[in-house]
């Protein structure tokens, strides 16, 4: 009676042990799975391209172009200084018109020319220091070499016309000579400068046939044109 029960218990234990051991992993298979497991790839190090992105080509081209323009042209032409020159010329025009002798009229405008040179020199020096453009640079020397010779010719012509008694021709001659000086010097400067010189020369050509309107032409050219182009240069080229 007890024998069948004993054999049943043994069968149950054997089946239990078999089921337990059958669930245990084989160490050899576990070793094979570890060997077959793919290795993790190392995370790539960040490159310099991702850390420092490439600069914008358009910005680089603009920087190169601005540098070349600054090195090849004289950008220290004082716009606001020319506006002040124009204001002083407008103030000198009515004073010169009250003069009763031609030499008194010439003296007023020569004083105005000396004042204009002082104002232009101070304004140019201030703008060159602010922009970091030295006045002894290559473009500045080229500007001066193109600007001064026509003015020297104008001085010689002024002496000749005064000695000949042809003072009524001076306003047109001065506008022509000054316009030529501005054009030749302005070749090495911003485009508005030679454009202003062309306007002076055109006004001088128009004023020569009307010598009695010389004082009005001096106010319109050395006053009005200086104010107009000085304002444009100040707005577009930093003062």
Image (cartoon, rainbow, N blue to C red):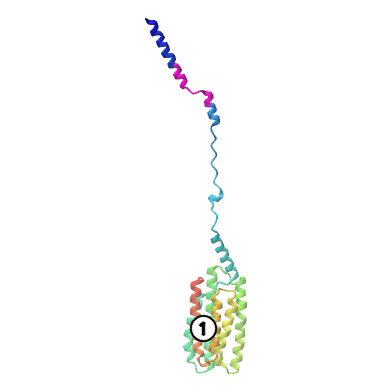
Q: In the depicted view, which residue is nearer to us: 142 or 96?
A: 142
The secondary structure making up most of the magenta span is helix
Query: What residue lies at 60% left-to-right and 93% top-to-bottom?
Result: 163
Asked whether residue 19 is drawn in magenta, I would say yes
Depicted 28 relative to depicted 158: above or below? above
Depicted 159 relative to depicted 63: above or below? below
Q: On the rendered image, what quadrant is the N terminus found in?
A: top left
Query: What residue lies at 61% left-to-right and 78% top-to-bottom?
Result: 146
Q: In the depicted view, which residue is nearer to us: 102 or 26?
A: 26
Asked whether residue 71 is drawn in magenta, I would say no
Residue 51 locus on image (x, y percent) = 53, 50
Residue 145 locus on image (x, y percent) = 62, 77
Depicted 16 relative to depicted 84: above or below? above
Quarter holding residue 172: bottom right
SS type, badge 1? helix
Q: Which residue is mark 1?
A: 222
Which region of the structure is painted magenta? Answer: 17-30
């Amino acid at each position: 009676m007890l024998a069948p029960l004993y054999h049943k218990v043994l069968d149950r234990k054997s089946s239990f042990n078999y089921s337990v051991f059958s669930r245990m992993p084989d160490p050899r298979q576990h070793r094979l799975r570890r060997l077959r497991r793919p290795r993790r790839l190392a995370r790539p190090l960040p490159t310099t391209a991702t850390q420092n992105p490439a600069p914008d080509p358009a910005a680089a081209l603009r920087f190169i172009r601005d540098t070349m323009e600054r090195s090849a042209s004289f950008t220290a032409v004082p716009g606001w200084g020319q506006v002040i020159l124009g204001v002083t010329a407008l103030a000198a025009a009515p004073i010169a018109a009250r003069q009763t002798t031609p030499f008194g009229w010439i003296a007023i405008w020569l004083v105005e020319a000396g004042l204009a040179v002082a104002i232009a020199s101070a304004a140019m020096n201030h703008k060159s220091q602010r922009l970091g453009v030295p006045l002894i640079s290559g473009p500045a020397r080229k500007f001066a070499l193109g600007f001064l010779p026509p003015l020297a010719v104008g001085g010689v012509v002024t002496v000749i016309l005064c000695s000949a008694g042809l003072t009524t021709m001076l306003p047109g001659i001065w506008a022509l000579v000054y316009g030529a000086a501005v054009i030749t010097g302005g070749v090495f400067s911003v485009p508005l400068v030679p454009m202003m010189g062309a306007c002076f020369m055109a006004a001088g050509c128009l004023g020569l046939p009307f010598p009695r309107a010389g004082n009005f032409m001096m106010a319109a050219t050395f006053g009005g044109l200086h104010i107009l182009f000085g304002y444009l240069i100040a707005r577009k080229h930093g003062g």
